[in-house]
Image (tube, rainbow, N blue to C red):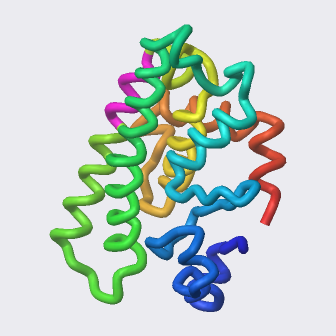
Amino acid sequence: MSIMDRDIGKVHNQVKSPWFLEINPNGRIPAINHNGFNVFETSAILLYLAAEFDKENKFGFNPVENPKEYSELLQWLFFVHGGVGPMQGQANHFYKYAPEKIPYGITRYLNETRRLYSVLEKRLADQEYLVGNKYTIADVKAVGWVRRSDVLDIDLPKEFPKLNEWKVKIEARPATVKGLSKP
């Protein structure tokens, strides 16, 4: 099952169906089933896919051979998972989709999204990617949110130029271009 923005409201209730609840008991996307093994939550999926398919650690670090870099990767992955994602998700809701405008909610979550973006901006001030100066699953996780900053009318090039450069660079990666072209 793939749910696009245009499908919301049409297929969304499938995530509450018994077959989907077997994959993700929380009844939310994303979730995958790989060879009979269920994985839900984006960061858990990224970590699972890296462990299963990135044996050369092209998108991460070996936790035994490079424990500090691996820990840094987890820190940034969890920063996005527990910070950017939830805060920007709430900002998107209150700013764009809530049936009534609630100024406190809009201000609170928009300011927090900007604060979290400033943390990413500072991190990227003197390095190319979030961890170890290579493209990792932490970047994969973060760019999905940052590339939707336009929903909040955040002027990324003006407010967060390094973050914008990073986003543009990732969006130009051939694999990213290919992935973004899939429905």
Query: Which quadrant holds residue 68?
Result: top left
Name above or below for residue 114 compared with residue 63: below
Residue located 37% across and 72% down the image? 93
Left or right: 148 with respect to 105? right
Residue 67: x and y in percent read: 46, 13
Residue 87: x and y in percent read: 32, 56
Location of the C terminus (image quadrant): bottom right
Residue 133: x and y in percent read: 57, 15
Please, which residue is most extreme toward the front here?
A: 36
Span shown in magenta: 118-125
Please, which residue is most extreme toward the left here?
A: 104
Residue 125: x and y in percent read: 43, 18
Left or right: 128 with respect to 180? left
Left or right: 100 with respect to 76? left
Q: Looking at the magenta stretch, what is its main secondary structure?
A: helix
Pick the front one: 6 or 48: 48
